[in-house]
Amino acid sequence: MKVVITNISHIKYAEIICETIKESAKVRGTGIAERTSEYITNKISNGDAVIAIEGDKFAGFCYIETWDEKSFVVNSGLIVHPDYRNKGLAKKIKKKILEHSKVKYPKAKIFGITTGLAVMKINYELGYQPVTFSELTTDEAFWNGCRTCKNFDILTRTERKMCLCTGMLYDPNHEKNIKQHDYNSKVLSRLKRIKQALFLKKNKE
């Protein structure tokens, strides 16, 4: 298994990446903003992504976006193919994309938003901290990317203060950004329960 920074040789995987993202959203029953094949191809070509491959078979992917004149970087579109899930691959991809982001944009704050407790746990262990949306980018283009998510109405109803996703931030200047061995499962479990309650309420409306 290789987890590498993308180049033009990986463009052939763009379609399966998009399809895997779409299918994952259906299975999870929560929102994942869809991306076009052209968009993913551009990220791959510019080396703004990492991909996991076993032989010639696609295994996982994550890409970089920049906002507010590159003062914020987001690691988006984390996906692992069903054949490779529950093997620790997501964490390897997240670690690789974080390292790549820090090298390419050394002064930027790095963040992500996610509905998944497993991803929150990985982020926390890599040094991310849960934050409010007000601490993330104010770039309208970023938040407009959420329009394809099925939960976008929650984001708009709360005036972009909260949604089913949790914001997590890695600040390169923050002394607490070290690997946490004392992972606080109670805090993140509480976050998950809150998100689930919102999701159930939304489905009953």
Image: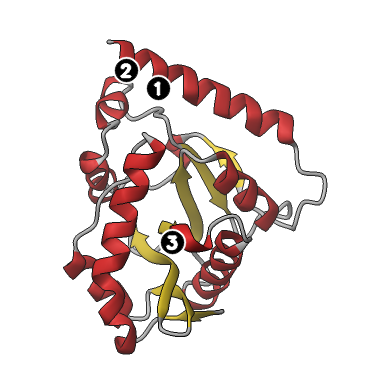
Q: Which residue is denoted by mark 1 in the rendering?
A: 199
Callout 1 crowding tier (Cα within 10 Å): few <14, some 14–19, many ≥20: some
Q: Earlier in the sequence, mark 3 or mark 1?
A: 3
Q: Residue 108 appears at what percent x and percent y?
A: 49, 63
Residue kind at label 2, given as amino acid type: Asn
In the picture provided, is 174 more to the left or to the right than 170? right
Q: CA distance from mark 3 to mark 2?
A: 27 Å
* 80 relative to 102, above or below: above
Q: Which residue is denoted by mark 3 in the rendering?
A: 81
Residue kind at label 1, given as amino acid type: Phe
For image coordinates 35% across by 86% down, the residue present is: 7
Residue kind at label 3, given as amino acid type: His
Could you say whether the residue bearing mark 2 is in a helix, strand or loop? helix
Q: Are marks 2 and 1 in contact (CB under 8 Å)?
A: yes
Name the quarter where the N terminus is drawn.
bottom right
The quarter holding residue 183 reads top right
* 49 relative to 4, above or below: above
Mark 3 or mark 2, whichever is nearer to me: 3
Q: Which residue is denoted by mark 2 in the rendering?
A: 203
Mark 3 or mark 1, whichever is nearer to me: 3
Q: CA distance from mark 2 to mark 1?
A: 6 Å
For image coordinates 32% across by 11% down, the residue present is: 204
Q: Residue 20 appears at what percent x and percent y?
A: 33, 58
Callout 2 crowding tier (Cα within 10 Å): few <14, some 14–19, many ≥20: few
Q: CA distance from mark 3 to mark 1?
A: 25 Å
In the picture provided, is 186 more to the left or to the right than 40? right
Could you say whether the residue bearing mark 3 is in a helix, strand or loop? loop
Could you say whether the residue bearing mark 1 is in a helix, strand or loop? helix
Q: Residue 76 appears at what percent x and percent y?
A: 40, 57
